[in-house]
Amino acid sequence: MNDIFDILIIGGGPAGITAGIYAKRAGKKVAIFEKFVPGGQVAQIGEIENYTGFKKVNGFDLAQNFYNHAKSLGLQFLMEEVLKVDFSGEIKKVFTKKNEYKAKAVILATGCKTRELNIAGEQEFKGRGVSYCAVCDGNFFKGQEVAVVGSGDSAVSDAIYLAGICKKVYVLTKNGFKVSNYSQDELDKCENVEVLNSAMSAQILGSDKVESLIFEQDNKKKELKLSAVFVAIGRTPDTEFLKGQVELNEKGYVKANADLMTSASGVFVCGDIREGSIRQIVCATSDGALAVTKAMQFLR
């Protein structure tokens, strides 16, 4: 690709789309890379109740609103996965499987990806009963018995959502819940949810699809007969392709200064992958606005 963009944004979640909207409205030549679905992880959330201006909004609907707003301005989306980058020169290079793109500035907004259990059967049954998105796949198991593995807000949110469509929901936690009182109270209202504390998932069994989950509790191996296992044990930053290009901390999050510029000149970061982010939608959109404002100042 011979054209040189003013700004290329890697990641089409709330942070990346916000940055793109600001840049487009400022008349910049800008494009957003997104390898999955525009809107990022927001599209996989059930009900959202802490995003200013919305008493309650479905995550998928909010993600669509972000995308539709961007498209109404003519913002370009490149549905390609970025495999590597070269930030060593004044002109930054971004490589996908098929193309090479160039830009004067880059904004990193790749977000985080779901952690895996790393137990026997998990890889084998992905898409056949093992899921990392209750909102996306829960309806496939309507009226059936399922399990959620996790101890945080995402696990509780998934359990509450699934309780509304499944016959029975087991929640396996390692060391008890680490959630707000509000989340705990909402979960307690779900009569078809059973919480199994100090439960360590060990193996997923089945033939063509998931049929049971083996776990350890009180030094005993136990088995749950069920149709699906929803994994909600947190996320890790999607930054492997950035190693050697920008400075990362020990957990893989991108380091940046007060202007959200990384260790590479002309490369900025926003959203969940930024070191210090509290990983909330409102913070991601704020980051996106700040990162693109500083990027445009850099270009000037």
Image (spheres, grey):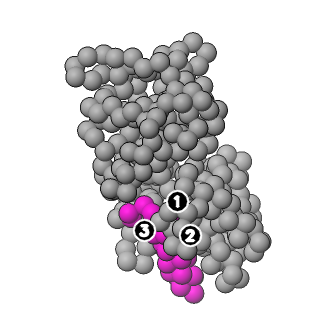
- Residue type at mark 2 is Phe
Q: From the viewer's perspective, is residue 282 above or below residue 189?
A: below
Q: Quick check: is 284 in the magenta stretch? A: yes
* 95 horizontally vs 281: left or right: right
Q: From the viewer's perspective, is residue 189 above or below residue 72?
A: above
Q: Earlier in the sequence, mark 3 or mark 1?
A: 1
Q: Residues within 10 Å of mark 1 (few under 14, many from 20)?
A: some
- Residue type at mark 3 is Thr
- Residue type at mark 1 is Ile
Name the image quarter holding the N terminus: bottom right
Counting from the top left corner in percent of width and height, residue 152 is at 36, 47
Q: Earlier in the sequence, mark 3 or mark 2?
A: 2
Q: Report if residue 204 is visible in the image.
A: yes
Counting from the top left corner in percent of width and height, residue 85 is at 55, 56
What residue is drawn where x is 63% and y is 71%?
Answer: 20
What residue is drawn where x is 22% and y is 22%?
Answer: 218
Which element carries disc 1, helix, strand or loop?
Answer: strand
Magenta residues, as a range?
A: 277-300
Q: Main secondary structure of the magenta part?
A: helix
Gap between marks 3 and 2, in whole Å? 33 Å
What residue is drawn where x is 62% and y is 78%?
Answer: 22
Name the image quarter holding the C terminus: bottom right
Counting from the top left corner in percent of width and height, residue 116 is at 44, 35
What residue is drawn where x is 52% and y is 17%?
Answer: 211
Label 1–label 2 contact, CB within 8 A:
yes
Give the residue at mark 3: 262
Give the residue at mark 1: 48
Give the residue at mark 2: 54
